[in-house]
Amino acid sequence: MMERRAKKILMLVMGLVFLLSEYSIAQTKPHSAVIGGVKQRFKNAANDPGDADRIYQESIDLLLQNNIEHDKKDKDKEESWYFLGAVYFFKNEYDKAYEAMQNSLKYGKRFLEKGEKIAGGLVLFSIKETINDIKLKTFKRAEKAQNDGMAMATTDVDSMKALLTKAIELYSALLSYDETATINQQSVISSVLLGMSNANAKLMEVSVDPAEKERYRKETVSLYEKLYAQNRGNLSISYNVFQMHRTASDWAKALQWIDTCMASPATDSSAKQIKIYLIQQKIIIYKDQLGQPDKALTVYNDLIKNDPTNPDWHFNLAGLYYELKQPDKALEELRTVKRMNPADAEASFQVANQVFGAYLRHRGDVIDSNGGVFKADMKKVTALLQPDIDECVTFIKDAIESLDKSSQNEEMKTYRIGILYNAMAEVEGHINWALENRDRVKVQKPFFEKAVQYLKKTTELNPDHKDAWRNLFIAYTNLQMVKERDAAMKKFEALNK
């Protein structure tokens, strides 16, 4: 028993000595022998692709254990690093391949333009070709990961996030190889930055953690700004930067990028629409976010100075004047809109609607200033309001006529005409305030009946039109049509549940 155990121990010791001696021999293999062994393994791998990974790993072990650490001559170091890079390249380990090729260039340029031919017809890329191919394959892998990730946006958010994160890593790796991202002598830097920024923006969109969302936002902004530096004057890119700052409520930077956007040329209708939207956003930021309505007014006045025949600026300026409680200036702007578009149905309706609203507000103010609803001298009130009433009636009649002749969507057209007839009826009631209620209703009746005619048609076209039912309720109430009134209210309430 003891003898057998002693023999086993002796065999183990001898085996260990053998392994150590093999390792020692491996450490002392000549440079040329290692390179020859690596070349042979390239041929073996080509002939036996199923075992290629194991064979390539043997080559890596040979080079790392021998030449990489023990080469003395620069030309040997240059060759060892080149072959190590080639092996890593064949194994698709591109980061390691790139690093090895760069190390080869530290010791010489022998392989920069010219690769290595191996017996059997196998040719290894030159360093320049290898690095170019590494960049190309990395770029294509990044694009695929990004496209696959975006395709999963609505089906598998976790997979989408994993793929987009991988895409960002690959794009970043490409930039680490070459910060100008030049492939086949063509720069793809814009595509890389756009891909990274869009991937980060999507990750920001789906992130639920506020800190993570902000991190993605900052990275997206940084990438968009780099992309804009590559494509100065590109409205789409600067618009995206603006939206990022707007999302973060960074109003100062949002305003800065609006100005950058406005400096970009608008060569098509889409770009022009973006600029109109940005102008509106600038005004909203000044007015609602920063509490600086005077600056909002300045924006409108500058717009009108540069584009005096654009009715939209005058119409929007009128709205701002109403908010600033300057109804006289608002009405003047609306009159300007009407003069510019006397036959335009949309402009006529919007102006009539605004003028009617302004008239109601002004009437309320006049009644309040004359003692309130129960004490005011309504004869005096009506006299003071006569110019407003005349203008309101004129604009409403013009709008009804324009809408009736227009080719607007039928549902929209009938609804608008209906509410304008309701407005006319209300104004007629104000004009005839001195009449008994029964007589005043008689004066209003034709207008309410017209309103019912158009509003019923609206509900036939769209049974779920809540505002049409609400206005029908108003008309039926004034016409004392109790059954119809209750039915309209019931429908309106049902739609509001």
Image (cartoon, helix red, strand yellow):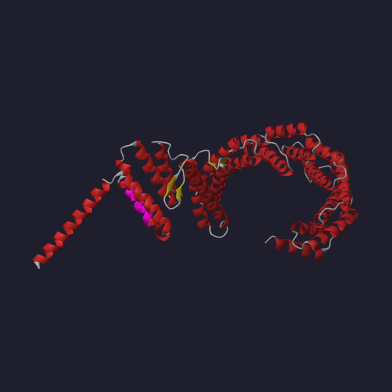
Query: In screen coordinates, is 253 left or right of 356?
Result: left
Task: Note whether residue 496 is visible.
Answer: yes
In the image, residue 145 sits, relative to residue 257, either above or below, namely: below
Please name the residue shown 33% across and 50% down the image: 61
Please name the residue shown 40% across and 52% down the image: 42
In the image, residue 62 sits, relative to residue 366, either above or below, namely: below
Magenta run includes residue 61 = yes
Residue segment shown in magenta: 54-64
Q: Main secondary structure of the magenta part?
A: helix
Please name the residue shown 33% across and 45% down the image: 32
Magenta run includes residue 427 = no
Q: Nearer the viewer, residue 482 or 459?
A: 459
Q: Residue 230, image x and y in percent? A: 59, 37
Query: In screen coordinates, is 219 left or right of 286?
Result: left
Q: Nearer the viewer, residue 434 or 53?
A: 53
Q: Nearer the viewer, residue 295 or 370?
A: 295
Residue most extreme to the bottom: 1
Q: Residue 153, image x and y in percent? A: 57, 56
